[in-house]
Image: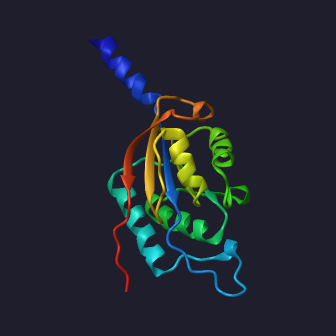
Amino acid sequence: MFNLGLEIILFFYKMLRLFLLRHGKATNNQGDTIDFNRQLNKKGQVQVNQIGYILKEKHFKIEAILSSSAVRTSETAEIVNHYLKLPQIHFDRELYLAECLTILKQINLTKGVKNLLYVGHNNGISELAAYLSGKSFTMSTAELIVLEFDFDSWNMVSTNTGKVIDRIIPDVHVI
């Protein structure tokens, strides 16, 4: 009996969780505003606050945040972190509008955490969810997909190795 209990503990110890969060709804590209500098609009701020609150209430133990350094993803990460209370967020310019394999390369380099939140852009983030899970996704703004992996190292995460355990789409109405 003790051995079975130990096996169960070791099984859960090995699990990694990846939280994929697309940035909240952003302002439209206005005149001379470059895409990188687009901010969250009012709806996007409400969406992201709702996701942050849900993450807190579900007691997900997110240990690190990796985010594109674009303004809208930075704002998304900062708002969510208001609920998570992590000491820092890792912002990476290379993740701005990054493709699936570029994002995965950065995730594969992660060390020392079992629960990682990635904040990014479409189409790369939807493609990554599909690549890792084998399911098709087109993520809406502020949508969160939670994937679980039966590994203890992020460098093992690759195609069709993840299982979708949660999918949250914020339900907000802004006038």
Q: Residue at x 64, y 60 (%)?
A: 68
Give coordinates of residue 85: x percent, y percent.
Answer: 48, 59
Residues 66 and 81: in front is: 66
Q: Quadrant of residue 78?
A: bottom right
- Residue 150 left/right relative to 154: left
Q: Quadrant of residue 51?
A: bottom left
Give coordinates of residue 112: x percent, y percent.
Answer: 59, 38
Quadrant in the picture for the C terminus = bottom left
Q: Is residue 142 above or below residue 66?
A: below
Residues 95 and 110: in front is: 95
Q: Is residue 163 above or below residue 166?
A: above
Q: Residue at x 67, y 39 (%)?
A: 109
Q: Is residue 71 above or below residue 22?
A: below
Q: Residue at x 67, y 75 (%)?
A: 37
For the rendered model, the colour scheme is rainbow
- Residue 98 left/right relative to 7: right
Residue 114 is at least partly visible in this image: no
Residue 5 is at least partly visible in this image: yes
Q: Is residue 8 above or below residue 125?
A: above
Give coordinates of residue 88: x percent, y percent.
Answer: 60, 57
Quadrant in the picture for the N terminus = top left
Q: Residue at x 50, y 62 (%)?
A: 81
Residue placed furthest toward the front = 136
Residue placed furthest toward the left = 1
Give coordinates of residue 164: x percent, y percent.
Answer: 41, 42
